[in-house]
Every structure is written in structure tokens, then in C-alpha cells.
Image (spheres, rainbow, N blue to C red):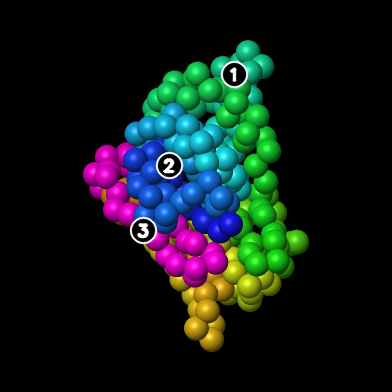
Amino acid sequence: MRTIFVGDIHGCAAEFAALLAEADYSDRDRLWLTGDAFSRGPDPRAVWQLICDTEAEMVLGNHDARLLQQLTALKQGRKPTVQYPDQDRTLAQLQPAHDAILAWLRRCPLYVAEDAFLLVHAGVHPEKGLQGTRRKEFLKIRTWPPTDDLAGPRWHDFYEPEYPLLVFGHDAPGGLVVKKRAGHPYLIGLDSGCIYGGQLSGYVLEEARLVQVASQQKADMWKRPA
């Protein structure tokens, strides 16, 4: 059994399937997603089908947390809060599976800590470590000190390893991140902007192998207006 991590998919089902093929995925492998599986992109329903087929597990991302709120509102008979048209489209495409996805998202943790790795969506508090990290930081941390800007020093520039390997997503502007000590990776950021025309990235833990496939999306297709 291998452990395969997959970066932020954002509804890019074709690229998700291509990455699984490139990684030689089999049903003996354990599949972990860094979060933000469904939002924005072209085919969130097919992403859900692949998650079901592979029994993939996931840490909760910031987009997933919002989808969880929206699905909860619908379940309770309330109108969900929707900020952008793509959120309406995602909800509509996922409609046949709303109940199943809601139950699945409710089970997604903020982090997974095992002997060999720590998996989070956005990151951890670089000074207080895992136990000192707040929910908002697990979901959204990017720069350090924290700002609302996309540019600036990243939290992981100040991070001292607590685990053999920390895997995260979220930071498409920062791109693929691989940091090593003594020739071995201790930190890997897998959000390489697939939804924006970049790549979908994965990592096979036992083989120390990075796997990437090209995006099939046009660079500005899914960007929201400023």
C-alpha cells in the first residue's frame, strides 16, 4: 500500500483522473487530498465520483468549508449564502449528491497527523506549531506575518519541522513548493494552480516521487473579476 497526496483539484476531474493514471494508482493505495476538491472548476460531480471510486480522504479546505455551510443551509431548508456565480454552478452540478457530499465533508478533519507525515490544507502557525494553529489558519494561512495580500513571505519560510514531512495545498500563487534538508523533503506544497492553467500535482510518499499533469484549463477561464 502506498500513500498518494493530491493537490487542490477545484473541479478539474479530467486532470485528477490523469494524475491517478500517471501515479499508477491502484485500489491498494491510500489517497489523500489537500482540500478544495469541488469549487470553481468544470466538473465537480465527476470529481465526487472519482472520490467515491477511490475512497479518497481529504483535509478540509477553505472552499470546502464554505461548501459545507451552503449544503448545511440547503439541508435545513434555508437559502445558502453565495458570493459568486461559480458557487451557484458548483451547487447545481453537485445537486444529485448533496446529502452524500455533506456527510463526507462533515467527516473531513482540519489536519491528519501520522508518524510519517502531517497533512493540512493551508498550513500551520510557524511559531506555535500544530497544536497552536487556529481553524482559520488551517484553512487560509498563506503569508507571515498574516496579511490579505497574495504576495509576501510565506508561513513556511519560518517553519521548523515537527514531522518528517508536512504536505499542504491552498497557495496557488506560491506554486509548487519542495523544501529539503539533507537531501530529503520535509515540506511539500502541492497547489500548482491547475484551475488556472498550471498543473495538478501529487506526491507518492513511499517512492518520494512528485507526479504532475498539465492543466486542461485556459489560464483565465476560472478567475473571478477583481
**Answer yes or no: do the residues labelled 3 and 1 have beta carbons within 8 Å?**
no
Q: Is residue 71 left or right of residue 89?
A: right
Residue at the image point whose x is 58% and y is 46% from the top: 58
Can you identify the residue that label 2 sits on?
10
Residue 220 visible = no
Q: Is residue 207 magenta?
A: yes
Residue at the image point whose x is 35% and y is 47% from the top: 18
Numbered range of the magenta stretch:
200-226
Q: Check the picture and name the quadrant holding the C terminus.
A: top left
151 in relation to 40, above or below: below
Residue at the image point whose x is 58% and y is 29% from the top: 101
> Which percent across, then down, holds residue 37?
48, 41
Amino acid type of the residue that numbered disc 1 sits on in the rendered structure: Leu
Q: Nearer the viewer, residue 160 or 82?
A: 160
Q: Nearer the viewer, residue 64 or 94?
A: 94
How would you rate the neighbour count of disc 3 (Cα within 10 Å): few for under 14, some for 14-19, many for 20 or more?
many
Can you identify the residue that label 1 sits on?
74
When asked about the image quadrant of residue 181, the answer is bottom right
Query: Which element carries disc 1, helix, strand or loop?
Result: helix
Residue at the image point whose x is 70% and y is 66% from the top: 115
Residue 212 circle label: 3
Q: Check the picture and name the quadrant holding the N terminus.
A: bottom right
Q: Earlier in the sequence, mark 2 or mark 1?
A: 2
79 in relation to 55, above or below: above
178 in relation to 197, above or below: below
Query: Which element carries disc 3, helix, strand or loop?
Result: strand
Q: CA distance from mark 3 to mark 2?
A: 15 Å
